[in-house]
Amino acid sequence: MTSPALEVLDVSRRFGGLLAVDQVSFTIAQGGLSALIGPNGAGKTTLFNAITNLFPPSAGEVRFLGESLAGLAGDRIARLGLIRTFQSARVFPGMTVLENALAGACLHVRAHPAAQMLRLPGARAEERKLRGKAEALLDLIGLLAFRDSAATDLPMGAQKNLEVVRALMANPRMLLLDEPAAGLNDSETADLAALLTAIRDTGVTIMVVEHNMSLVMGIADQVIVLDAGKLVAVGSPTEIQANRRVIEAYVGAEG
Amino acid sequence: MSGFLQIVIGGLSQGGVFAAVALGFSLVYRVTGVVNLSQGAFCVLGAMAMYYFQVVFGWPTPIAAFAAIVSVVAFGLLVGVSTFVPAVSTLPVSSTLVLTAGLLTFLEGVALIVWGNQPYALPPFSGEAPVVFGALRIPTQGLWLAGGTVAMIAALWRLVYRTSLGRALQACAENATAARLMGIDTKRMMLISFGLAAAIGATSGLLVAPITSLQFDSGSFFTTSGFIAVAIGGMGSFAGSVIGGLTLGVAEQLAAYYVSSLFANTLALLLLLAMLLWRPNGLFSSGPARRVDVRSEAPVHRAVIRLPDGRMIGLALALVIGLGVMPLLPLPNGVLPSLAISMILFIAVLGLDVLMGWAGQVSLGQAGFMAIGGYTAAILATTYDWSPLAGVAAGVALALVCALLLSLVTGKLRGHYLALATLTFGLLVDSLTVGLIDLTGGPSGLVGIPSFGVAGFDFDTPASMYWLALALAAIFVVLLEGGMRSKFGRDLQAVRTDQLAAAALGVNVGRVKTTALCISSALASLSGSLYAFNFHFLSPEMVATPRSFEMIAMLVLGGEGTLVGGLFGALALTLLPTLVQGLALYKTMAEGALLVGTFLLLPEGLFGRFVLAIARWGKAGSMAQGKLPT
């Protein structure tokens, strides 16, 4: 029996007197596409930040592929294959679109820095290969024409797509995407949905924080609902759509 | 016992000035989130104005003091409104910090032009006779200074905590955006804090001038001492500034008396480094400290400066050939040695670019590594008869060891604390080169350094030295360009612009910073040893902290993050004073003005602008094909 991709065990996160995430537990199986939903202020991004130790959990534990993440710095977590994006696209300013994509591959460059400085054939071949992969991904998402533009010149939606490409360049075993569809129009959202499904089909586990219900219900195989820091429900999209407590959380309890 | 008390009293009066400068730092920091390194220069300007009004014009002391403070504040407001306030509003915090270092250089240059390079002392306010308490003798000026400092603290405290202007200043400190939304003119508040800090500086300067003789570059001394004081006490804390200043004053006087006056500074600096390691926020961590974190997390916008691949080789060849034939041309007298010096300095500036331009780590201590390389190679070659090449290698090795030790301190520091740590390191090396007389020859320097030589060939002419430095620089540029265009360069830039996002992709931020510091230090060390072999002489002031500021000016003028750009900065700042002899007096001022002006008007630098122009020209066709998605 393989261990689950992500186990969130009784995780809480406190900011001063505010309990932003309150004893949340759930499990994500390998190879799945899960969505974390909830009204504004439900604690979705806080939970994301707790999982990746940006603001570590005040209590509880997170395990990735059976291994505890407690006390691990951000780069160590990335090294395990857990790669995240940010709610506001954080592309690197001062770098081109292509360079931003390549920056995601930093864990997978084998060539020694000295070999790169000396432009040895092995290092150049590896660089060409990475470049080819980055260009293929950029092409998939419609950004190849802008490979040499400054990344910060792209509109916000395209910057978020670039961030997904950058994360993919890291060969993740699991992707945590924070509102990837924010700022995208309907056809771009459809493209994104296709891309996410395609990534999932290559065996990468995905978890998205998302507001866009049609996207979530269309592609997720598991939906996790948070409200006011507490776990409300976990289940398949159809189960969640029928769940009374979820409806109450979104439209408010009646009476 | 009375001897000890006497020293403590001397320390307290010295510390009073440090405390006043530290107060100025804290005030401006609280309102703007920036450490204004030009603070110390206002002390000198205050003393200088006082000298003219009191000694030259013969005005009575109170009127002269008032006129001096008013004129310095007026000048300070002018400087503030034209440089500091626009910089705080548009530049990232690290650039603003470096810009204020440029302001410091500029103001020192102004003082040099007005005042010359002689030390001046003012007459004490109420005679030379000290007040005597039993065996204690207290100079009356010390009492003036103490009283003045207390009065300034009281006035500042009242202003900040008891008036509506003070509340507006506080609001800017707590949350500038919210303050702006509440209708507070934040730019005006920045300017007011800058002007108040100038007033504090001027007052303490004219109070201390009768005790300590001042000269045009005493501003750096006040700035660094005040900076150390504020770091000990806690950035932004008024009480901490005063206690930090007094502690530093007393500690330095005690060290000077009981250890050696040559090492007074060294001990204070070691104290500070230990402090930064132990409690980076100072003894009194200040209220609104998080400001700087908010700012340094803000994205750093910079144009993408890339030469199109196809044009690289041609340009590089043209540059190397063009530079290579220079010594064969009929050059005016003195130009060839200046070319050699520029090229040697460029090697250190190249290292600085990796550290500052690519990794975004402000370093105010690059000259310290030059000194390590220069002195190591020179001492080994003169006293121990080592071959120059072995000396150079030993210098680089020692610089790497120091860089690794320094990175233990700087690893967790950002923004101005990082700048402070590197500045402290540079000053520490300064004080050791002066203090270790048996090893370094002390202030008068080390003579009889041989020429650089390898395998029987001596580089003993300016032309040969120039070609050597050019060849080395070309090799390093080619290697670094290769590194910067691959994973290492991308990691560096990721760390510069967004450490959080970099770490989330698996970049080991700490190791990347340390590597950049090591590259930078090794190149500085090499440059320093070539510098010593070139002059056959090395004195502390040739590789002291002003040199660090000068190299930053070279880098910024040429263009950060361009590798080659620094060469043009080095050529400009080295050749101009040689070509136009009359300019020598204005060199300091011009360096400062160029640094400040470049930041505000040409943030990409000379070479950066050139590359952007070429790239735009080359891309004019290809851009038309792709339209940005909307």
Image: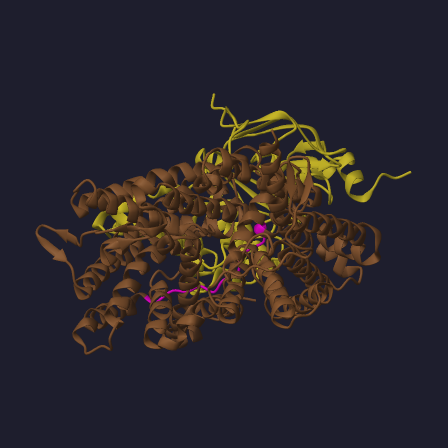
Chain colours: A yellow, B brown
- Who's the residue at 28% across and 67% down the image? B338
- Among all residues in the image, which is located at the extreme top? A1
Q: Can the viewer see residue A173?
A: no
Question: Which quadrant is home to the C terminus of chain B?
Answer: bottom right
- Who's the residue at 10% across and 55% down the image? B457
Q: Residue B505's x, y, as percent?
A: 47, 43
In the image, residue A21 above or below residue B435: above
Magenta stretch: includes residue B302: yes
Left or right of residue B165, residue B570 in this image:
left
Q: Along the line of sight, which residue is nearer the eye, B598 or A144?
A: B598
Magenta stretch: includes residue B323: no
- Who's the residue at 51% across and 62% down the image? B216
Q: Residue B104's x, y, as percent?
A: 53, 61
- Among all residues in the image, which is located at the extreme left? B456
Q: Along the line of sight, which residue is nearer the eye, B74 or A230?
A: B74
In the image, residue B271 above or below residue A130: above
Q: Residue B194's x, y, as percent?
A: 66, 61
Q: Can the viewer see residue A193?
A: yes
Q: Along the line of sight, which residue is nearer the eye, B411 or B232?
A: B232
Q: Along the line of sight, which residue is nearer the eye, A75 or A208?
A: A75
**From which residue to which does the magenta span run?**
B296-308
- Who's the residue at 19% across and 78% down the image? B330
In the image, residue B365 above or below residue A139: above
Left or right of residue B430, residue A35 in this image:
right
